[in-house]
Amino acid sequence: MENEKINNNIDEIEEEEVIVLLDESTGKEVEFSLLAMLEVDGKTYAYLEPLEEVEGFEEGDLLINRVEFDENGEELYYPIDDDQEIDKAFEAFDEMYAKEFGMHCDGTPVVE
């Protein structure tokens, strides 16, 4: 990950910052807790955990969205379709998580 810029602003996120996204398949609004926002290779990603039961999500699953900003500075959340981009974004989150908590997202300890 030495070529990737990782900006850990997890400390700046309010403890219960809630993001509401529209589930395009059902048209229903779904609430997510914002766990972190990281910058990887010049792109910003939001790491979201559902606050309610969501079809297709198991406990501990994350939703990763690319975040872009409109002309007013408002955050816009976009799904990621590219598997390589998702993998890279997840690796950045796992690295941040490992540094913060001493274990990887899957619960395995960090080996030094």
Image (cartoon, rainbow, N blue to C red):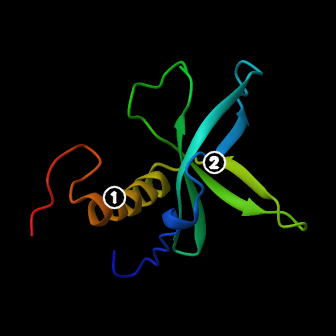
Residue 97 higher or lower than 60, as above or below? below
User: Along the line of sight, which residue is nearer the eye, 102 or 54?
Assistant: 102
Q: Earlier in the sequence, mark 2 or mark 1?
A: 2
Rate crowding at label 1 as few (under 14), some (14 to 19) or many (20 or more) other CA atoms within 10 Å: some
Residue drawn 60% across and 68% down? 43
Residue drawn 27% across and 58% down? 101
Amino acid under disc 1: Tyr
Residue drawn 76% across and 53% down? 76
Q: Position of residue 29 (x, y in %)?
A: 74, 27
Residue 99 higher or lower than 90, as above or below? below
The circle drawn on residue 68 is none
**The N terminus lies in quadrant:** bottom left
User: Along the line of sight, which residue is nearer the eye, 35 or 6?
Assistant: 35
Amino acid under disc 2: Glu
In this view, the residue farthest toward the front is 15
How many angstroms separate mark 2 from mark 1 (CA)? Answer: 18 Å
